[in-house]
Amino acid sequence: MKNIDSFTHVRGESLYVDDLMLRQDVLFGLCFDSPKAHGKIKSVDYSKAEALKGVIKIFTYKDILGENQIGGIIQDEPLWAEDEVHFWGQPIAFIVAETEAIAKKARALITIDIEELPVITTAKEAKEKGSFINAPRSFKLGDSAKTFADCEYVFEGETFSNGQEHLYLETQGCYAVPQENGSIKLTSSTQGPTAVQKTAARVLGVPMHKIEVDVIRLGGGFGGKEDQATPWAVMAAVAVQYLNRPVKFMLNRHDDLRMTGKRHPYSSFYKIGLTKDLKIKAFEVEFLQNSGAAADLSPAIAERTLFHACNSYFIPNVSTTVYSCKTNLPPNTAFRGFGGPQGMFVIESAISAVADKIGIDRRQIQEENLLAENDEFSYGQIATQVEAKNTWFSAKEKFQFEKLEDEVFAFNQENKRFTKGISLMPITFGISFTNTQMNHARALIHIYLDGSVGVSTGAVEMGQGVNTKMLQVAQSVLGVSANRVKIETTNTTRVANTSPSAASSTADLNGKAVEMACKSLIDRLRKVAAKMLSSEEKNISFQEDFVYLDAEKTALSWEELITQAMAQRVALSENAHYATPIIHFDKTKEKGHPFAYHVYGTAITTVTVDCLRGTYEIDAVKMVHDFGKSMNYAVDMGQIEGGLAQGIGWMTMEEIAYGKDGRLLSNALSTYKIPDIFSAPKTVETIPLETEGSEWAIKKSKATGEPPLMYGIGTYFAIQKAVKAFNPNYKLKFHAPFTPEKVLMGLYEK
Ligand code: LUZ
Ligand code: MOS
């Protein structure tokens, strides 16, 4: 089935926050934010701005009736700064005016006096100064310290991976409308409707039932709207509470870039030990996560870094520690992979460093250490239904890896102006929110009198195609055609207390709830049909809008059945709750079974470096990916290709830059480059590894949201090989992104 949104997308009819019909008395909001990264607010002068015609009111923390607190995991973030600012771009006030243009003019009239305090922008500095968000976390398996003594090769090194801007096409925003009796409806571009509702209620000092959050779809989220869609919606809500008029607040691109957090940069230090036959016996890492000025989701992201620190390899002795370092940057946040990619980059770097030192290809080490059935992850989960070797060897065989490698070698023998590099990148990604209690979802299904069906879930459509999958589940369980099923907006009054759409788990969790609710309805309807047909329930089945008797004769139409069911006063609505079984995790021991299952895959990447310019092209990325039993290849391949492109961007060209003063320098699309069609691989091929899937995946169709991003990591190492092929003196560096500037310096390094 095609993505059900593709038609309205192409016709330009899909609705986003910016497309909503506005009420006549609508006002517009704009945020006034800190022009310094750290300091004490001595005074702010709003008088000129307030005097501007068309300015209705400027809101500050003093106008908050509830709590000035938006922190989730840790309560450390005010909605609006009070006497101190901790990052450049931190919200201080909210201007509400008759038009956006007036609000903008007013913002320029505000003056602020800040007594500056020292600014920390890097995780290393923060660690030196003891500036942390919370206590460090450590995972341990075996005894790494002791094992190094028995290793033939022991190496230590340092790596860095930079942040990444989400660059969702639709910026953050919300339209807030007053309802009766102090209720407010928020149409928000959020991955987490319940987070918006809960935080709005808290800041406004009202019960949650006064706040209704509705989400139609997002123009991209990528994690950037898991936690950080909330403040903007809450600001609009505070204004509505006071003014009793609708308020629209969409961030423009520059404000969004400056004020929101990004993927966490990581500085990491590793030590790796291998035996003579290349078995990795011991691995230690200290991860320094640059968390920014407040916790946001950093502790959870740090945890996922530990979960993925060994990527697809079995290492019997592991000791990993992560520090969430508090700096004066906007709080960094969820971004596709959620700390996992940062962890994987370190082990892949360590493998490259060792291979280079002992003069072999990195793939030899990779191949020797791939995860196998019943291996233990450092967090205690036993690996089952493992496809690491399967995807690795399938990729090598199906894409004729040896031939590809020979071609690269031959090319490099003959060419100097251009060199090529090739890499293999296996991935293993755990599916479930690492916080066990978040793994639940609900669905509410209505069958209407005419047999048409409305499906509500907690799933947020953000371009990933989850609505298409929900529709497929409902349709297949009910046995009705696709055009009978409508997926409703995600709304907190229909489906409450939801986890955000995140962790690649949205289709699994919400899909299972849809499946359960539809099964209950069908069980009920089967009784009605059996009675109508004077048959037994077990002989009744449903398919293509018909009720079948003994699986062959069409006995009744779906409409006839629904009419009868209604006449017999049978309930045609159903609500179901799903919570993933089998998962658990004990944080006191840092052991458990946190993931319902893992997704596996292997990518082969070939690149060509222009040795005069330092630029490069990605010739091909060829992947064997474990979809389980994909329920929709169109949607899933879209996730693979999009994830890959985003991973390549992170590893190659997307370069976030902050000044020493904490100001974002890469603050526009002229200074922050994301992959375009020219930087996309010339060839992208994906071969599905047909496996049994997992019973915890919806219809055994494994999650595809985040895992493919990590295929992009292979690009870094392919480029590295091409640089080395040109310049044997190049000393490997592990400092992502591998921009053309860095390539050029590497090519001519003495
Ligand atoms: N969000 C979250 C996530 O809250 N917990 C997770 O484990 C997670 N994993 C990936 C992406 N978002
Ligand atoms: Mo996410 S990084 O919001 O799954």
Image: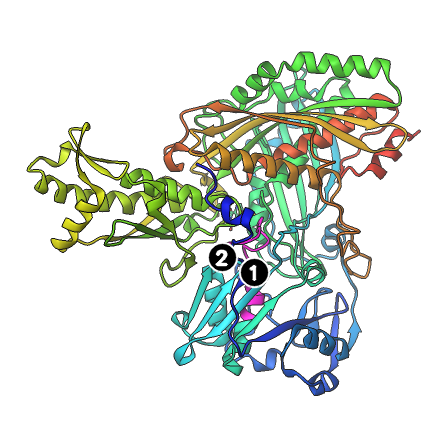
Q: Secondary structure of the magenta portion, mostly?
A: loop
Quarter of the figure with residue 728: top right
* Residue 549, horizontal then vertical, whole percent: 15, 32
As drawn, 668 above or below 85: above
Q: Is residue 62 visible?
A: yes
User: Would the CB of label 2 be found within 8 Å of ligand 2?
Assistant: no
Pick the front one: 466 or 626: 466
As drawn, 179 above or below 137: below
Contact, mark 1 vs mark 2 (Cβ under 8 Å): yes
* Residue 651, horizontal then vertical, whole percent: 71, 38
The quadrant of the rendering that contains the N terminus is: top left
Q: Is residue 503 visible?
A: no
The quadrant of the rendering that contains the C terminus is: top right
* Disc 1 element: loop
Q: Is residue 192 left or right of residue 539?
A: right
- Find residue 192 and name its label: 2
* Residue 8, horizontal then vertical, whole percent: 50, 49
Identify the residue position indicated by label 1 in the image.
229
Span shown in magenta:
216-234
Q: Amino acid at mark 2?
A: Gly
Pick the front one: 305 or 189: 189
